[in-house]
Amino acid sequence: MIDLWYKLADYVLPFDLARYIFIKNALLAVLLVTPVFGVLGTMVVSNRMVFFTEVLGHSALTGIAIGILCGIHDPTFPMITIAVVLAVLVNILKGMTRASMDNVLGVVLAFMIALGITILSRQGGFVKFTTYLIGDILAVTPQQIAWIAALFVVVFVYWYFAGNALILTSINESLARSRRIRTFLVETSFTILLAVVVMVAIRLVGILIINSLLVLPAAAGRNVARSVGSYTALSVAISMLSGTTGLFASYYWGTASGATIVLFAVGCYTISALTGRIRHKLFV
Amino acid sequence: MLFQDNKEIASSVGDEFCRHCCIKISNLTVRLGNKPVLDNVNLHIHCGEVVAIVGPNGAGKTTLLRAILGELPYRGAMESRIGGVEGRIPRIGYVPQNLQLDLDSPINVTDLVVLAISKHPVWLGVTRRLSEEALHVLSVFSAGHLAKKKIGELSGGELQRVLLAIAMTAEPELLLLDEPGSGVDIQGLSLFYQLVRSLREQHDISVIIVTHDLAGISNYVDRIILLNHSVVAEGKPAEVLSNEKILHTFGPSLWNISAMPTLPYLKEQP
């Protein structure tokens, strides 16, 4: 499978890039992960879950720490476990508490970061975990790409069947329930999927900026979209565009790919915000 | 408990229509935290009846709706009889008070209707056939011209009409309207209620309207139920509005409203 991609990439990429296998791997990873982020991001932004996904991303620190305490070499599994538990807990809590969700999440964020750093910094050893903070797309392995490809399929199949229910639930929960939609199930399955995607992608783009990749394309699409269809399409397109341009730019500039991609996404957001304003002035 | 025994109303209103939906709620108690929001509520919504549940803010009106929708755990019994069959849960059309939307939400009216009438994933875009169907659904409620508008751009009255159109696509046996008056001007509201009444005549549905506007609702309903954590009183609009004892019992807020029968929309009987 991956050989097929390598051959295809030889035709698509300019020669100086096509020499390197790691560039081809990184490009494939970006092409698979950015549409997923584009689609999931639409719901994160519509449901005002931006702070929640920030907390989710940072919970990776605790996941890594607990993995190390348990002597597990690859921290992906403990990271996913912690994130999924957190996602489900927050979803349950949301239905129970009358306290501001922002405050609750703030406390959880502080706890997750502090616990993670405390454990990881024993004997001054935090430096070796900085790759998780920034991420490294160029180091992505074919095995990781296979995981991402599987998630790509899962997310789009899920979205095909549950997308309508998610949108209706985000518009009005009671309205959704009167339509026989099991809103708790819908919301919980979405946050679990979100948790898994974020944890798998964190290796690539890093804890510090993963949330920007989730939020920016959707926020940019929202500035100009006038329907659910165009919102989703724009979000996916902007995500893929800033992903690929950011990846290539980071190669030529010798910078961290994740951060460079985010800069391009911020550019897209700014352009869309201006376009939205101009259109508003012209037509309304 | 002034009009608690409503056998007379049941025979006059209920049996006449009695082929579709009919809901009996007995000893319904809902607690949020330690506080009972609804305490021993007994209600009988007859078939084909338009009922207003009126009460001040915090009286538990919306909680009652949410219990009927099955969203909240409750103690007590909720029985239904539809088309002579006992126990089946009625198909409910629900018109929410408002939507949890940001003004810039990229959802247009067509999207919202398609969400309700089809399983086609809206995020893939709406096909021409579906958008024509949506237009048809909307034009029945004279909302066809709103199809391309974003939901956040609608006025209160327009949104209510769109939501009513959507609720009716479920072919409901019971229609629940949550505070349809909020954000709608008096004229728009009067039109809206007339629309609801005409729906009742065409579709044989029962309608529950939750509101705090006793005066505004009284011309359009068969029965008014005054709710303040439990049923305080119930009766035909004329009985409720003319009974000073009820109005006093129920509190000064309603007493004030009842002192405004000179408003023009109260005089015109539909």
Image: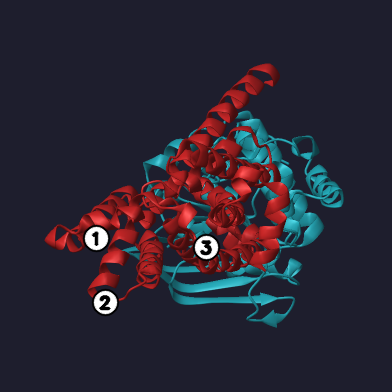
Output the chain of dot 1. Answer: A
Chain A colour? red
Q: Identify the secondary structure beneath mark 2.
A: loop
Position in image of residue A5 (x %, y %): 68, 60
What's the residue at 21%, 61% (across, down)? A120
Q: Which circle's residue, 3 or 2, is located before the other in the chain?
A: 2
Q: Which circle's residue, 3 or 1, is located before the other in the chain?
A: 1
Please state which of the two labelled residues, at mark 1 or mark 2, is closer to the viewer.
Answer: 2
Output the chain of dot 3. Answer: A
Instruction: Report how far apart the C-alphas of labels 1 and 2 lie in the structure.
Output: 15 Å
Query: What residue is pinned by disc 2?
Result: A71
Give the image quarter of residue A223: top right
| Screen quadrant of the C terminus of chain A | top right
Mark 1, Cα crowd under 10 Å, few <14 / some 14-19 / many 20+, is many
In the visual, does A48 lie left or right of A110? Answer: right
Query: What residue is pinned by disc 3?
Result: A190
Name the residue nearer the viewer: B32 or B37.
B32
Residue B127 visible in the shown view: yes
Amino acid carrying mark 2 in the image: Gly
Chain given the colour cyan: B
Query: What residue is pinned by disc 1?
Result: A116
Amino acid carrying mark 1 in the image: Gly
What's the residue at 74%, 62% (across, down)? B119
Please state which of the two labelled residues, at mark 3 or mark 2, is closer to the viewer.
Answer: 2
